[in-house]
Amino acid sequence: MATERLTRVAATAGLAVVLLAAIGVQAVAVAASWGLRYWLVGGAAAVVAGALALVRDRQRVVTAATGLVVAGSAVAAARLFDLPTEPGPALALASAVLVGSAVRALPPLPAGLTAAGGLLVGAGAWAAARPGAGGSGVVALNGLCWLGGVATGLTLRLLDERARATTERVRRDERLELARELHDVVAHHVTGIVVQAQAAHLVGRRDPARATESLAGIEAAGGEALRAMRRVVGVLRDTADAPPASAGTEQIAELVERFRRQGPPVRLCLPGETAWPPEITSTVHRIVREALTNVARHAPHAGQVTVDVTREADAVVVEVTDDAPGPPAEHRGGYGLVGLRERVEALGGTLRAGPRPDAGWAVRAVLPYGRP
């Protein structure tokens, strides 16, 4: 999230520099030919449209519509008052950014209308162009900017939709896997209920005390089955609350050992008591597996990897860290972590993944333990 915010700020700053440079170059060019006062209207329009382009993410419909109205007004003013042909380079660039932003993010109808509005402004510039005023070059520049804005917006829209589809598929697959695991847990408890009910039926008449013990076991197994079934319903509702089952700490040790034979050395720390519900143990296994897979993929040169599983008062904490030198790879947080976060949050926990302050990468998950 912080990286995305930093990238957005850097992109906005770069666009501001380019727009200021375009406005400055155009002001110098008009001052040397027509006189700067002839560009007061065009310059004001370029400044307004450029400011709208810099805040385009806040109200895309309003900023795009306002920017196109400003550009169209500049075209009309240039024709009526015999001014240099508009939109000039700065205004054309700002308009292209607004059109591209709208095409990328708005629903199809307003995105198409915005693109059509940009084309209409370009057509107005072509109709209002006069020979000897640099009209043909301005019209060509506006056409190229419009095409570039629409093409860039469509490309980014396609990439965004693919990323959303991939993320949703990962989450859906994770929920289906959780549902399959919980099915096994529920079947296990229901089988236990049936067995203990049969036992209570057989011994109830001869030994009431033993029948009471069987009924207590049935009650406990029924409560656990009910909790697991609620989680299954959460999964099948396809919402963000759902959950898991099986794989003991011995599988975690085997997983770490396999990784140790092929990758960097690993230090494993497990608590002595691990009688956790199946969904907790299963999720711990998944977290360790995904984190070690990311290390093998993106940081095979790490000197040390640490897998630390601890039991706190009301939670199990899993932390996997490495000390790979150099800047962290931005793609370390891939779709595997999306599925993990889906699983952890389904259990009411939290998962964080990111670069460590000194060097390397850390994945830390907190899984509530013993909560209803």
Image (cartoon, rainbow, N blue to C red):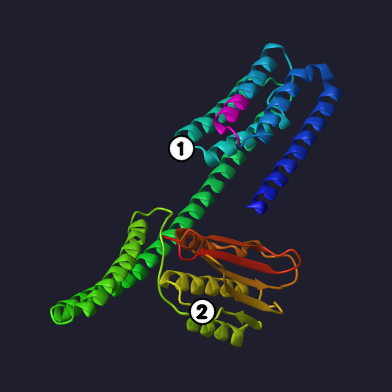
Q: Element type at marker 1?
A: helix
Under mark 1, the amino acid is Pro
Q: Say few, some or many: other residues with alpha carbon within 10 Å of mark 2 (under 14 / 14 to 19 / 20 or more).
A: few
Which residue is nearer to you in this view: 257 or 116? 257
Judging depth in this view, the residue of 200 and 141 nearest the camera is 200
SS class of the residue under badge 2?
loop
* Residue in the foreground of this view, choosing between 209 and 318: 209
- Residue 222 shows up from this direction: yes
Judge the density around disc 1: few (<14), some (14-19), many (≥20) Cα neighbours within 10 Å.
few
Q: Which residue is mark 1?
A: 108
Give x and y (percent) for residue 227.
35, 62
Residue on which disc 2 sits: 273
Screen quadrant of the C terminus: bottom left
The quadrant in which residue 62 appears is top right
| Residue for point 57% across, 33% down | 60
190 falls in the magenta region = no
Q: Residue furthest left?
A: 205
Give the magenta-colored segment's residue range.
Answer: 58-68
Residue visible at 53% across and 40% down in the picture:
105
Q: Position of residue 281 (x, y in %)?
A: 46, 73
| Relative side of 244 to 221, left or right | right
Q: Is residue 169 above or below residue 31?
A: below
